[in-house]
């Protein structure tokens, strides 16, 4: 009986450290709000709740008001609202390599210090490589920036090939024109390497999914909305090129272009209820009373 107990205890000593080591290599959701979602197939998005393990290579979206804190041993990554990023882990124990692919939003990282660089953040504009530090990365549709609180972060601009080692209190910003650096005690030095192609596209270039990656569609959607609005406004201007000097006498009488150089005079129809008082130099003058079909107009939708 004692021999059996000794064997069982020995097995426990072997299995438990192995399980603890495996758990230490996984990212756990320490704090997650209701809007946080993740996907492993880029199609189906699932809620990420407190205490859940994040699958390797999963994409995470926080939504407009979502916040998330991931922990793995001594390390942590905090996600702010409107952030879309994925975490890739390769190897194990001391040979582990972590790559964070951040398409948009803001993350703050607390990384364990090691002799060799083991964590990289890839964005559409820059790459940040660290040995062990605390820093923040922000990504928008047109630029990315890095601010260092502790340790050393090597930042490289893909497009320009500029590179700089940032220390505590220093930061770098990268956009289409290149890299700018600044610091509390002086600007860090900038060197140059060969330009390269970013591994992750900027927001609007592609979409990760139809529903969960709403942040990636924001720019394109707002542009489409603006274009649709412009189309409505242009349709309400009418087809005339002259200086509008008449008054539309539709049933509702809301379309009024008197007293200014409007763009609605010349075709005899006012397609909306906008008051056309903008300047426009036409080829003729529309005089008299234009009778519009304001009551049947669909541009109010």
Image: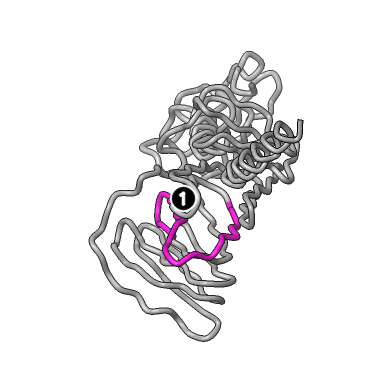
Asked whether residue 124 is drawn in magenta, I would say yes
- Give the side of residue 220 with respect to residue 125, left or right: right
- In depth, the one of 16 and 166 nearer the eye is 16
Residue 294 drawn at (x, y percent): 63, 20
The residue under the point 46% across, 32% down is: 207
The residue under the point 56% across, 76% down is: 169
Q: Is residue 245 above or below residue 124?
A: above
- Give the side of residue 198 with respect to residue 242, left or right: left
Residue numbers of the magenta segment: 106-128
Residue 184 drawn at (x, y percent): 55, 82
The residue under the point 69% across, 18% down is: 251
Residue 226 is at least partly visible in this image: no
Q: Check the image and name the residue furthest to the top.
A: 296
Quadrant location of residue 29? top right
Residue 231 drawn at (x, y percent): 49, 30
Q: In this view, does 72 lie above or below 232?
A: below
> Which quadrant of the figure contains the N terminus?
top right
Q: Residues within 10 Å of mark 1 (few under 14, many from 20)?
A: few
Residue 265 drawn at (x, y percent): 49, 31
- Give the side of residue 159 with respect to residue 248, left or right: left
Residue 152 is at least partly visible in this image: yes
Q: How many labels does the image show?
A: 1
Q: Is residue 23 above or below residue 224?
A: below
Q: Mark 1 points at which residue?
A: 96
> Which quadrant of the figure contains the C terminus?
top right
The residue under the point 56% across, 34% down is: 55
- In depth, the one of 281 and 229 nearer the eye is 229
Could you tell me which secondary element the residue under label 1 belongs to? loop
Quadrant location of residue 298? top right
């Amino acid at each position: 009986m004692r021999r059996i107990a000794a064997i069982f205890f020995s097995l426990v000593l072997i299995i438990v450290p192995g399980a603890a080591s495996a758990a230490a290599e996984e990212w756990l959701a320490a704090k997650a709000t209701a809007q946080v979602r993740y996907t492993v197939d880029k199609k189906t998005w699932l809620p990420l709740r407190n205490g859940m393990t994040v699958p390797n290579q999963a994409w995470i979206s926080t939504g407009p008001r979502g916040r998330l804190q991931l922990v793995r041993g001594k390390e942590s990554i905090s996600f702010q609202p409107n952030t879309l990023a994925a975490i890739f882990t390769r190897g194990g124990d001391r040979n582990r390599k972590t790559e964070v692919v951040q398409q948009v939003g803001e993350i703050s990282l607390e990384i364990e210090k090691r002799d060799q660089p083991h964590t990289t953040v890839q964005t559409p504009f820059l790459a940040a490589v660290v040995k062990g530090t605390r820093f923040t990365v922000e990504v928008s549709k047109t630029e990315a920036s890095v601010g260092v609180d502790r340790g050393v972060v090597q930042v490289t601009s893909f497009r320009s090939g500029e590179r700089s080692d940032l220390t505590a209190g220093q930061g770098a910003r990268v956009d289409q024109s290149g890299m700018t650096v600044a610091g509390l005690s002086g600007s860090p030095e900038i060197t140059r390497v060969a330009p390269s192609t970013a591994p992750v596209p900027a927001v609007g270039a592609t979409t990760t999914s139809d529903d969960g990656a709403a942040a990636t569609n924001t720019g394109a959607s707002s542009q489409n909305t603006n274009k649709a609005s412009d189309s409505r406004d242009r349709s309400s201007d009418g087809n005339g090129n002259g200086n509008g000097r008449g008054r539309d006498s539709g049933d509702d009488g809301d379309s009024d272009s008197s007293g200014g150089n409007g763009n609605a005079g010349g075709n005899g129809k006012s397609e909306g209820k906008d008051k056309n008082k903008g300047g426009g130099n036409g080829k003729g003058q529309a005089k008299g009373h234009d009778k519009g079909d304001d009551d049947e107009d669909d541009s109010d939708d």
